[in-house]
Amino acid sequence: MFKIARGRINVWQVLAAIIFMIFQVIATLYIPNLTSDIVNKGVITGDTDFIVSAGIKMIVVSFITVIAAFGNVLMASQASQGLGRKLRSDLFKKILYFTHDEFDKFETSSLTTRTTNDVVQIQNVMIMMLRMMIMAPIMLIGASFMAYQKNAEMTKIFLISIPILLVLVGAVMFFAVPLFKAMQKKTDCLNLVFREGLTGVRVIRAFRQDKFEQDRFNDANQDYTNNAVKVFSIVALMFPIVTLIMSGTNVGITWLGAHYIANQSMEIGNMIAFMTYAMQILMSFMILSMVFVFVPRASASTARIQEVFETKSKIDVVAKPAKLKNEPALSFNDVNFRYAGAEKLALANLNFNMTKGQTLAIIGGTGSGKSTLINLIPRFYDAETGVVSINGTDVKALSTEDINSKVSMVPQKAYLFRGTIRDNMLYGKPDATDDEIWHALEVAQAADFVSELDDKLDSEVEQGGENFSGGQKQRLAIARALVKDASIYVFDDSFSALDFKTDLNLRTALRNDEKISQSVVVIVGQRISTVADADQIVVLDDGKMVGLGTHAELKANNKTYQEIIESQLKEGK
Amino acid sequence: MAEKNNQSPSVGHGPGPGPAVVVKPKNFWKTTGRLAKYMSGYMVGIIFVLILAIASAVFQIKTPKILGEATTEIYKGLMTGVAQQKAGLKINGLPIDFSKIEHIILIVILMYLASAVFNFIQQFVMTRISQRTVYKLRRDLKSKMARLPIVYYDSHSNGDIMSRAINDMDNIAGTLQQSLTQLVTSTVTFIGVIWMMFTISWQMSLIALATVPLSLIVVGIIAP
């Protein structure tokens, strides 16, 4: 908790909050003192002047309490919200530099919960800490001292009420805390099932699994409800218990007080003040016991966040990045790669060398490692052995920013961001002109349908680009990659959703484009027609490079390539 | 207290800078009516809870006054004692009527106990009612999701639907559990306390009430 806050929380705000709080406590403790004075010296003797002057004092002290409390709340809120803001931005920054390895390890949904829910949890505890948890012990000591001063004998009453309070509250917590923890898990479960129902809605409908889904959700729902009923029933005990103990203490004080007053060892005003102090003492104990509930919950969140921070990105920030050359080139030298923890190599012994103006195509069956190969280029993963270099420099010697600026990628699954088409197009080059955008759309064969939209470039794109068809999304994603000025353009099976004619037009346009024809283009494809006109074709089979050459060469003497051609010819008929 | 805090770490409708936007309810009465329909099966339970809430509040109000009588008793003894001393009489201890105080304290303890038990039962029942209601709400939402056309899924972001199904539901449960009984208890307490205050001293009550508009102004400024 403190480790995570260090350096992220504004120390001055924390200090200010604590100072305000101390003033608040002192003022609060002083008020009962004034009350007892008013009763002892004013009411009993009938001294009205004294009552008035003490009353004015009381108003002033109350006012100080209010201001101090306000200052405390203000500072505590600012400090804890600031901490939350810093935590979120640090987490986001950290996650941005994660490689796919780390994403695989945490899973996206868990990273989301960590940056939102867990941070809020810490924020909440921090504000409680600054407002109440630190106040409780100070209040406790202060009120105990004052009460002892008013009547030392009567403090014995706490020897009974405090242990009872602690035991009962402790017992409630003992039973409630594990249930609260279970509830967190059951909430996750409810979340999971419901989310799957949303993301998988098409599959569920297609397979007519509505009923099964309904039952599955019902089980989770039932489970959650039962647990919630249990935990809140136990917690329902808390309030009556605490009220009862406080009231009981009050009754006890009155009873004992009556005796002390009878034998004149106590003044009546002191008894009234004593009651107030008693309440403050018991309240402090209550708050302290709460600490034992909330701190463990926050520490679970802290641990989850800490885990993200402490994950060393496999790809270290390069201390002294080499200078990236401008001449487009891409080469793989003896590259081997395996996924974290895997026994088998995912890619073995890759070798090829592409220079400016050349097109590399990669073909192979599903699971042959095509996308894996692609992911090595922008250093999403690191090669186990061998060297991947772009523009003549090993990617491991380059800064992430440089790599990202020179590699433009169209992922297999086109993803568009919510906003306008223009927003999406500017993603790789924020200062691109409309002409450049239209040109890219033209090349990507997307200009037609975009110009038919009412708002053209300003048309809305929904989350994930769901308001466009699969093929349109693909082409927009391609256009986005083309707007960017890069050395290497990578298309990961990006033409699969296009019909043959559009596919052909697009490849022709790419070849004739001034910017693209001066770069290295990498195309992953399944169709022979997509890859046939590439300068070099890599044939992958089960992670191994089984062929490298032009279409004519491979057609003549590569068995795997021939098999692929054959299978597609049959399909074509 | 603990439950309140548990319900509240809402992630709301997406994180973001600036203050959380409070969504003003549309069709307040319509939605309230719908909620009431969901709860209609628990009418007996709810009435039972309301009666308990009123009873517990009444006890909570009555007791300080009765305990106050004990203090008054002490004060009376003290004053007579002082008067006697002034009159030159020698006394052993002040003439406080302990048997009367004892009697008062016994009643007070019983009332506090009853109030605590009522309070617990009321929470106990209300927890069940609110959780069952939200259970049904969730179940119906899920089956509605199965009947919605796919277009709905495309035009609403998953995050938004999720936050309705999970977060908003939790908020409803929390509100039902806490606010409904609190509303009744607070109303009864408010009326009861004012009545009690006026029976003790109407002048003092007026002074105390003068602070109410003041605090309302403060609340108005802070939470418009």
Image (cartoon, rainbow, N blue to C red):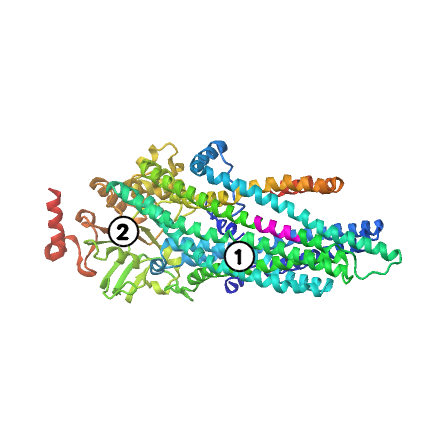
Q: Residue furthest front?
A: B99
Q: Percent position (x, y) of residue B69?
A: 71, 49
State the mark number for residue A492.
2
Amino acid bearing label 1? Val
- Between B213 and A481, the one nearer to me in the picture: B213
State the mark number for residue A513.
none
Q: Percent position (x, y) of residue A89?
A: 48, 55
Mark 2 — on which chain does it sit? A
Magenta span: predominant SS is helix
- Between B58 and A131, the one nearer to me in the picture: B58
Q: Residue furthest right?
A: B88
Disc 2 versus disc 1: nearer the observer:
1
Q: Is residue B36 above or below residue A107?
A: above
Could you tell me which residue is drawn at 68 percent across and 42 percent down?
Answer: B196
Q: Quadrant of the C terminus of chain A?
A: top left
Report the span colored magenta.
Answer: B105-114
Q: Percent position (x, y) of residue B137?
A: 40, 40
The reply to whether label 2 and label 1 mark residues of one chain is: yes
Res A365 quadrant in image: bottom left
Element assignment for label 2: strand
Element assignment for label 1: helix
Quick one: label 2 or label 1, which is nearer the N terminus?
1
Amino acid bearing label 2? Asp
Residue occupied by mark 1:
A125
Q: Is residue B40 visible?
A: yes
Q: Percent position (x, y) of residue A439?
A: 34, 41
Res B154 quadrant in image: top left
Mark 2 residue crowding within 10 angstroms, few (<14) / some (14–19) / many (20+) = many
Q: Is residue A438 left or right of residue A260?
A: left
